[in-house]
Image (cartoon, rainbow, N blue to C red):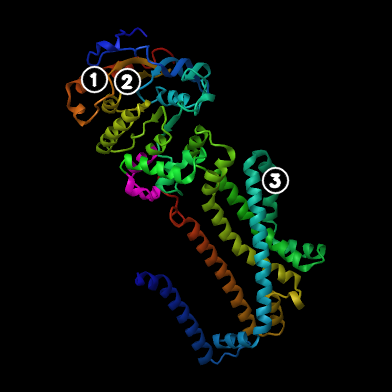
Amino acid sequence: MGMPANERSEQAPGALARASTSDPAVLEFLSADKVFANGKRGLAPIDLAINSGEFVSLIGASGCGKSTLLKLAANLMESDAGRILWWRGPFAYVGQEGRRLSFVFQEPTLMPWARAVANVALPLVAAGVPKSDARARALTLLRQVGLESYASYFPRQLSGGMKMQVSIARALVTEPQLLLMDEPFGALDELTRNRLDSDLAALTKVRRCTTLFVTHSIQEAVFLSSRVVVMAAKPGRIFAQLSVGEPTDREEAFRDSDHFTICCRKLSALLREASLVDGGLER
Amino acid sequence: MPYRWVRELGAPLLVGVLFVGIWQAICRSADIPPYVFPAPSDVGASLIAGAPSLLAAWRNTLWVTTEAFCAAVLVGAVCGFVFVQSRTLERSFFPYIVLLQVTPVVAVAPLLIILFQNTNVALVLCATLVAVFPIVSNTTLGLRSVDPGLLDYFRMNKIGRWQTLVRLRVPSALPFFLAGLRISAGLSLIGAVVAEFVAGTGGQGAGLAYEILQAGYQLDLPRMFAALLLITVSGLGLFILMVLLERLLLGGWHEMNSRPER
């Protein structure tokens, strides 16, 4: 990509930037690509590194391979060429101490027969943590997402936003170092989404949890991210990257800042450009 | 809420009482003799008079039904689990289970009764053949109908095959399995009674079907009705038992007969 590569130290508002290379990479795509079974190319070879502590959003039109990229990162799908490294190692080492990964799907994917607290405790119980211990940790997480009083509710008794919060609590209960999220708030109304975005920013900041986040929303991407990756379609590829700044102090006030507005405007322009080159390269 | 109870139990009870009352009134006012059509009071009298043999027959029928039901649950669940392990196994064996299902039990029963010296074994086998199909198909369907998102979640967390079975597949299959149980419980009773009809055996192991046959030969209509009443009560009892089991196991999370919204 022929993007101007500013160093992060400059921190001009909304500067196009490549992340500093001094941070240890948590997740690396090395020319990883994906060809679907029908022969269609889903992803052009992708080079992307997510560094420790970053909050990176993937944004782009439908069909630009955002979800595919995330599925590759979660090893739910394998790349056809190139490599993907987790903490500079293969997926087999993921799950060890200091290399834990969690995934939040578009849907809450909760077990309908289990109460909220049991749903949150699932990854711990399945990993052999004693039940009372797992339950206590699950309750702590539920308190942190503000659902303490709903611990004994069944999923069908919760609203869409609450179910998503339970799903996030379940992802965070293992104290992951890498969090992958696939449009978790896509189905929610804007007010709820803004509230959950603020909560998520606080939760990941406290944990210093590296996050890769797929979204359709410009505002959401700018509000949450330190870096936004703009993708173009046919085949799915990285079109541009936008640095937003350190993911600290992402509180409601940030939404009203000039920096936020400028970044949104730049991102919007980049997305428009990305949509113009659609289909230009292949098919 | 007492009002709800009145509506749920009171209304059908009222219909029943009215029906029986009108039946009694017509029989008595038109002076219909019991051998043409018995009044409810005749049936009641016959039930009390014939109690020793009717109750023995009832016990026998219930026993065959229970044995067949248990056998069907066991065999059906095992088949379901095996089928889920491999599509090839399912494809190879499922047609034969369908074959068993589509062959009328009345047609198979004489053969089984000749093949097995022990009538009781033959009866249980007949009833099991009828009852096993819903359990096999529902267990298989249930174990397969796991939310693919949850399956992905389990896979990503490197949760093993056994844990996935216990924590995900079995609970997902439970509503389907219980629906199978409900159908199968009724079928066990039907199978047992049909097999008894075909066997036509009296003596120690005589069931309610034999009572009905005997009453038919003797034109003892009140006794026929009494035996019929006991069969109906058994079927109803089994159904209620299964519904209670379903409530007990699914109560909190699963709205009756509807998938939980996500």
Q: Residues within 10 Å of mark 1 (few under 14, many from 20)?
A: many
Q: Is residue A148 magenta?
A: yes
Magenta region: which residues? A147-167
Q: Is residue B22 magenta?
A: no
Q: Which residue is mark 3?
A: B93
Amino acid found under the numbered disc labelled 1: Cys
Above or below residue A168? Residue B171 is: below
Residue at 69% x, 82% y is: B53
Q: Is residue B202 visible?
A: no
Amino acid found under the numbered disc labelled 2: Val
CB within 8 Å, label 1 to label 2: yes
Residue A1 is labelled as none
Above or below residue A271? Residue A2 is: above
Q: Which residue is mark 2?
A: A228
Amino acid found under the numbered disc labelled 3: Phe
Q: Nearer the viewer, residue B148 or B229?
A: B148
Above or below residue A128? Residue A35 is: above
User: What distance separates the C-alpha of mark 2 from that of mark 3?
Assistant: 54 Å
**Residue A268 percent location from the top left of the image:** 26, 20
Secondary element under disc 1, as helix, strand or loop, is: helix
> Is B193 left or right of A1, judged from the image as shown?
right
User: What distance separates the C-alpha of mark 1 from that of mark 2?
Assistant: 10 Å
Quarter of the image for the N terminus of chain A: give it.
top left
Residue at 17% x, 27% y is: A256
Residue at 34% x, 12% y is: A20
Residue A263 is labelled as 1
